[in-house]
Amino acid sequence: MLQCAGPRGPRDVPAGQAAGAAAPPVLSLRGLRRDRAPDREGAYSLFVPSFTLRLGEKALITGPSGCGKSTFLDLAGMVLRPDAAEEFLFFPGAREGRADACDAAGAWKAKRFEELACRRRSVGYVLQTGGLLPFLTVRENIRIRRRLLGLPPDSEQEARTAEQLKIAHLLHTYPERLSVGERQRAAIARALAADPPLVLADEPTASLDPENAHTVMRMFAACAEESGAALLVVSHAPEQMPDMYFRRLHIRLGATEAGTQAVLEEDGRA
Amino acid sequence: MNAVLHTLNMAWRDYRYEALLSACSVFVLAAVLAPLMVLLGVRNGVVQAMTERLLNDPRTLEVTPSGSGRYDPQWFRALSGLPETAFVVPQTRSIAAVISLSNPADSRLPANTASLIATAPGDPLPARYGLPDAVTAPAPEEGGQPGAAGAGAAGESAVPAAGVILSESAARKAGLGADAAGALLEGRVERVVEGRREAAAVCLRVEAVLPAEALSTDAVLVPLALLAASEDYRDGRDAPFFRPAGKARSGATGGSASPELDAYIRAARDKRVYASFRLYARTLDDVAPLRDYFLERNVDVYVRAAEIEAVRDLDRSFGVVFGLITGAALFGFTASTAGNALANVKRKRRSLGVMRLLGFPGGGMLLFPVVQSLLTAVFGTAAAYVLYLCTAYGIDMYFAGRISGAETVCALPPDRLPAVFGAVLLVSAAASLSAAFRAISIEPSEVIRDV
């Protein structure tokens, strides 16, 4: 089952629904808030009361268009500064069993941007469309995260993932020569390279036709599950998700005096 | 640090990937820089050629008093202490500085009159032509090395010969060629004492012959003491070196009396008052200050200041034109580089945002556009230099027929190249700064979803 896990991937992490309270946390958020245009018409605020993601967990966030799903992913991926955060911990060493946490809330507050940039190297991020660097070949794009982490290239894992995502024949091609679907698969391969403890995906298949989207999403989920990473996917079309267990969350919009307030909630509790 | 290097590599990969666009910016720079290099080269070449032409004329640096005065050793000490002075040697009245030369080896040739010019070690005139400058006074000890041949040729004198340098025409008239070093001549001076005409002779050993362009008159460069002795003799005083003509006595006038001769040579240098002098300025720029120095002291001098000033003027005018054109080009280049770098960052903002998302360091992002500008600067300067070399070759070919000798019209001094290169690098880096700050301030979340 754990065919595509890297050499450092823990083999004993229970995947899918088995990821219970025993698995170590990868992300722990409390009281996280991000405001948009707070003084103007259309003021909006995203609030995350509490959210913890554990190694091996797969979470799916749904919600209407423009509700702030991407904003949440950017917050979780440490590329967007939160306006308030009681707790924002990222555990880059979760896979290796290390419990040392990166205090992202503190880093944002103290403007330690380089520390955050450094931590982002331990996060895989799949964008809606590609996001491959056009001046690098597919293989170089895939290797870049390992390079930034100072790790040597892992050809074996690279080949396995490429095989699984059916891009092995494209490794020496530049992104501009790829189809949209091939680009997405290459981006997924890049996100999974270097065995990140956390993989974020923002509508990873939205730019594909439904059939293709389903296939790619299944490949992605399978690879992520095998790698043992915590997976956080945002989608406005949950019906495209493969038949796998996903912990489901959604962003609920509500009107307040201050404008629109979006709150991240677990499904089933709403 | 490693991550920053990775970012720089990314800048290089991006630069290479967009080879066509990069080449365009390289050619833009080359198109700006090559004409400037050619202009700088022409300015240098022309001014250098004219300067060389001036410097090749030994009279350019010479400062000559037009009248005669009374210059004591103190005056000469002050003169040689000036930073502008390269060389100064006293000179007697011109009326006393004539000698009649004859070649004892070829008695058919008539004796010819030549003027005596004082020289001393360090004289730039022979030095310019690679000739020995240390024209020695006659060696104090008797029966010197000129030996039997010298003594025999010059008569019965045992007085050692004085080393001299002849001008080309003086040598020619004495039947000597350019390779006359070592030949012996007899010099003769005359005086009238109480109505009687007297003459005295000195044996001169030719050390070297100046080329014709160095000195166009019949002249002999002699040690100062010999010139002083000639003046003394004419004035009716006792003089060393010279023996009365026709008297077959040897060494009567000082050749053997070395302490006296020594004293005489020292006095000629340190005590005597002279009517004139020969002075050379150190550089072209020193001529005008020296002229002013003499003007202040009411000494009329003849200098080539006007010719020098003409070249200086040309250099300055060239400099102004060059400065204006450089200023305009600099402005254009800075604006185009800055604009290009900004447009690039704007165009690539998604890639830059993705790089930031992937965790590339801020310092690297800052350097991304700077490195690309510097790459353009390096390749652009190289391309401009190649263009310059071709143009310079063409110019030199075209003007080769009109220009004498080895002078080139277009010559960029090699030591200027690092300065040009450094300036281009600096301007390129500075012009890409605003792009650099834009690159580092890119918010990934604002650009990574652009399509």
Image (tube, coloured by chain):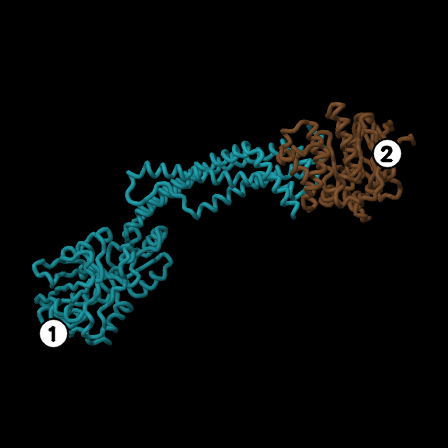
Chain colours: A brown, B cyan
Across and down, in percent, residue B87 comes to 31, 59
CA gap between label 2 and label 1 equals: 132 Å
Q: Which mark's residue is nearer the viewer, 2 or 1?
A: 2
B147 is higher (above) or lower (below) than B45: below
Q: Is residue A113 left or right of residue B320?
A: right
Which image quarter holds the C terminus of chain A? top right
**Looking at this view, is B113 or B65 the one in front?**
B113
Q: Chain of mark 1?
A: B
In the displayed structure, does residue B203 sit left or right of residue A27? Answer: left
Q: Which residue is mark 2?
A: A247
Q: Residue furthest right?
A: A269
Tell me the subunit letter for badge 2: A
Q: Amino acid at mark 2?
A: Arg
Name the residue rendered at 12%, 65% in the picture.
Answer: B191
The reply, left or right, for residue A32 in relation to residue B140 is right
Residue marked by disc 1: B249
Q: Is residue A108 visible?
A: yes
Instruction: Tell me if residue A258 can be seen.
Output: no
Going by the image, does B331 lie left or right of A184?
A: left
